[in-house]
Amino acid sequence: MARLLLSFPEDQFYYSTPMSVRVTDINAANHLGNDSMISMISEARARFLFEFGVAETERDGTGIIVTDLATTYRAEAHARDQLLFEVGVMDFNKYGGDITFRVTRPRDRKLIAMAKSGFVFFNYKSSQVVAMPDDFRGKFDRVNWID
């Protein structure tokens, strides 16, 4: 079976945020569970968007909707570990792009996980995918475009 390989441009990480692994994030194997990592990635995405002034949903009903998520795990994390989530963007197109994540444990500089979350702009009132707003596009002047 082919393995997923995630590699991101270093210059596309725009934001970082620390998070602690809670005891409740630990699974039966005594390490950070997949479901909890996904929740932490979602929290990092929300913090990133907030930092850049991107509302979850605008008055006209437009917001960002996640279309996919790919995650690779490189090392275990345990209860009370402090993790650093670096967040970036890449591969913009007319409707969205990818939000990227690199998760490390600063204490020993260990790479814990890499992830990529696809997104599109979506109008929740009309239930339709819509073009990326110019305001959002202007926040990330170094990002690559694929169309």
Image: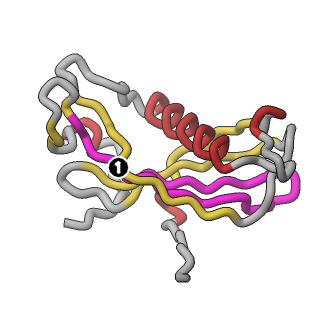
Q: Main secondary structure of the magenta part?
A: strand
> Residue 107 in magenta?
yes
Q: Dot 1, crowdedness within 10 Å: few (<14), some or many (≥20)?
A: few
Residue at 84% in and 43% down:
81
Residue at 66% in and 50% down:
34
Question: Horizontal and vertical percent for residue 143?
Answer: 35, 58
Residue 16 located left or right of residue 127: right
Give the number of marks.
1
Secondary structure of residue under mark 1: strand
Residue 82 quadrant: top right
Residue at 49% in and 67% down:
9
Residue at 12% in and 28% down:
126
Bounds of the magenta segment: 99-122
Q: Which residue is mark 1?
A: 67
Residue 133 quadrant: top left
Quadrant of image for the N terminus: bottom right
Question: Horizontal and vertical percent for residue 147?
Answer: 19, 66
Question: Horizontal and vertical percent for residue 107?
Answer: 87, 51
Residue in the foreground of this view, choosing between 42 and 50:
42
Q: State whether residue 119 is above or below residue 109.
A: above
Spot the residue most to the top. Answer: 59
